[in-house]
Image (cartoon, rainbow, N blue to C red):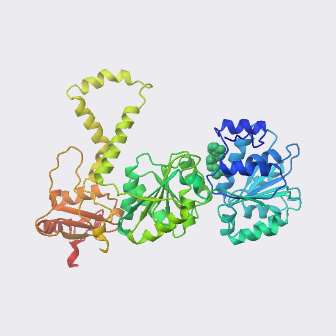
């Protein structure tokens, strides 16, 4: 197997790479590094993020610059602030044994004065977003005269974002350029044009489009109705207690709404969207990166350039229209040899899109059943048990409490104590999921328009609930009520509220379908009037409750 040493990397960089735990070069590194080390060959690398492309250009760049002179010699241009910071972070790790090399990040949305000061202090490598770089050139704060190496990272993204002119301006104004290194996930005609115009016989390398990533990502999908998308998302999250993931939505409104709804329901999530200030964005990203935030929800635009290690799941709240967008999204997981899962929530009519993605990405999709309420409870339960078994009790004063605890628990046997612990942790899940519907769109449901589906009478574990589904020859009546999640209800608390008010037993209820402002309640027809009498016209938090028979409205 090839080593970094075989590729011609110098000792100080070899030590850094080894301290980062890189054992062998990735495919793009193996192919690019020997070419780039020559310093004079133009290069095009067709590679996605996650293939190790930053090191593929970063290591040779650090080796070819002259560290004895302190003026900008290399320019790395990339589409976003996030990517800019990531590149600088990686270069900083690589140059840990090169104290005389300075790297500066230059991007918009933050003080230009500080960046100018950094440049004036004397740097060899400038990593920049196009807009801010042009600004600095116009202010004569940076001199491109002495630039020998220009790296264009994620060139296709920069063109998509409308930076073509800026890039051409940069290439035109670097007269001493010895070589240009262009990295891109795709090769649209505009990039070909730029390369023809500004590069000399570039050596072109393609890293098997998705191959490296493919093997590490399991592409899964769940089929449901548009109406059950949100519930399905929650099931997926609840079914994966250790999840550390990014959820993608098409619109920022969706990202915002879903984030708010999930936060209200106790999930650890925040949104990234275009309306955030830079400071808010940095805060959210910081929390996500250090894992104090478990889930991030974002649009494609807002998530551009984000590279976070250890993402376990990418969730497509809806499938994107564009296969490349799917590829970009899924590439956020399964990085650097880790396993990852990309989950898509789709509706029946989207199977053609799945086929298209499958064909282009050459990776199969696996259809999974949306977990039932019972599945979720079981999964959460075992996760809890694992946590209980692994908890570290070696520190702290637990020993001193033992005699007191033993006395307190004297009348309870071990099974009782365990049950109580489980109940403490699980009541939320049990209450929420004990009446959970089957969210899967089955063959038999096709053609039915978002029909409320048969009630999943899944039982909790071991509480001996003998409740029977309502089968007295007829359908449930359906009640409408103008209360919903916006009133601060979760399904369990709502159920409790309507039952307490009406003095009915929960056996009379069928499915409860909650929306932001309104809800629909299935109920045995004989109990419907009692519920309406109990709630209609009463006040909830100062607002009049309106409840009536939904089918007679
Ligand atoms: P990139 O494609 O540059 O965004 O890299 C993806 C991730 O892979 C980064 O977090 C790198 O730290 C990591 N990485 C890059 N090269 C290697 C390597 N040779 N071995 C292991 N991990 C690597």
The one of 325 and 499 positioned closer to us in this rendering = 325
227 relative to 35 in the view: left or right: left
Q: Residue at x 34, y 66 (%)?
A: 515
Q: Position of residue 210 (x, y in %)?
A: 58, 57
Q: Is residue 408 above or below residue 448?
A: above
Q: Position of residue 87 (x, y in %)?
A: 69, 51
Q: Position of residue 424 (x, y in %)?
A: 30, 41
* Residue extending furthest toward the front: 1
544 relative to 264 in the view: left or right: left
Q: Position of residue 39 (x, y in %)?
A: 83, 52
Can the viewer see residue 516 in this picture? no
Q: Residue at x 24, y 27 (%)?
A: 409
Quadrant showing the N terminus = top right
The one of 386 and 530 positioned closer to us in this rendering = 386
The one of 366 and 318 positioned closer to us in this rendering = 366
Q: Is residue 378 above or below residue 402?
A: below
- Report which quarter residue 4 is drawn in: top right
Quadrant showing the C terminus = bottom left
Total number of numbered discs in the rendering: 0
- Report which quarter residue 392 is drawn in: top left
Can the viewer see residue 103 in this picture? yes
């Amino acid at each position: 197997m090839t080593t970094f040493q075989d590729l011609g990397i110098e000792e100080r960089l070899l030590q850094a790479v080894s301290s980062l735990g890189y054992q062998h070069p990735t495919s793009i590194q193996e192919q690019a590094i020997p070419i780039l080390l020559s310093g004079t060959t133009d290069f095009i690398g067709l590679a996605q993020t996650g293939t190790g492309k930053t090191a593929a250009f970063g290591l040779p760049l650090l080796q070819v610059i002259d560290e004895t002179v302190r003026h900008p010699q290399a320019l790395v241009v990339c589409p976003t602030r996030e990517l800019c910071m990531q590149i600088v972070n990686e270069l900083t790790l690589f140059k840990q044994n090169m104290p005389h090399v300075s790297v500066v990040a230059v991007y918009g949305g933050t003080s230009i004065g500080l960046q100018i000061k950094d440049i004036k202090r004397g740097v060899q490598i400038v990593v920049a977003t196009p807009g801010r770089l042009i600004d600095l050139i116009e202010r004569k704060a940076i001199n491109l005269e002495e630039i020998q190496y220009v790296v264009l990272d994620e060139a296709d993204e920069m063109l998509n974002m409308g930076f073509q002119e800026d890039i051409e301006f940069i290439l035109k104004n670097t007269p001493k350029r010895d070589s240009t290194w262009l990295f891109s996930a795709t090769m649209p005609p505009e990039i070909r044009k730029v390369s023809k115009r500004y590069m000399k016989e570039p050596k072109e390398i393609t890293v098997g489009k998705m191959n490296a990533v493919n093997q590490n990502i399991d592409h899964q999908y769940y089929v449901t109705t548009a109406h059950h998308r949100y519930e399905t998302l929650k099931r997926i999250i609840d079914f994966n207690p250790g999840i550390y993931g990014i959820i993608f939505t098409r619109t920022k409104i969706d990202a915002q709404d879903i984030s708010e709804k999930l936060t209200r329901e106790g999930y650890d999530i925040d949104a990234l969207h275009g309306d955030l200030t830079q400071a808010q964005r940095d805060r959210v990203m910081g929390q996500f990166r250090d894992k104090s935030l478990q889930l991030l929800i974002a649009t494609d635009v807002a998530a551009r350039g984000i590279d976070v290690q250890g993402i376990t799941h990418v969730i497509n709240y809806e499938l994107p229209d564009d296969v490349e967008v799917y590829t970009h999204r899924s590439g956020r997981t399964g990085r650097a040899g880790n396993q990852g899962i990309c989950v898509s929530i789709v509706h029946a009519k989207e199977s053609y899109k799945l086929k298209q993605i499958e064909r282009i990405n050459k990776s199969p999709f696996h259809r999974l059943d949306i977990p039932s309420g019972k599945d979720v409870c079981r999964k959460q339960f075992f996760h809890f048990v694992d946590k209980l078994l692994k908890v570290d009790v070696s520190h702290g004063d637990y020993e001193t409490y033992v005699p007191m605890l033993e006395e307190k628990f004297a009348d309870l046997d071990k099974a009782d104590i365990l049950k109580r612990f489980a109940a403490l942790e699980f009541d939320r899940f049990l209450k929420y999921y004990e009446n959970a519907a089957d969210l899967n769109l089955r063959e038999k449901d096709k053609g039915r328009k978002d029909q409320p589906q048969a009630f999943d009478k899944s039982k909790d574990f071991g509480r001996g609930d003998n409740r029977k589904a309502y089968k007295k020859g007829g359908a449930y009546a359906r009640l409408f009520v103008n209360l919903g999640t916006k009133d601060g209800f979760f399904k369990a608390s709502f159920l409790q509220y309507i039952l307490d008010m009406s003095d009915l037993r929960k056996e009379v209820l069928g499915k409860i379908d909650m929306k932001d402002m309104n809800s629909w309640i299935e109920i045995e027809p004989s109990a419907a009037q009692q519920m309406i009498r109990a709630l209609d016209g009463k006040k909830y938090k100062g607002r009049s409750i309106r409840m009536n028979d939904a089918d007679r409205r």
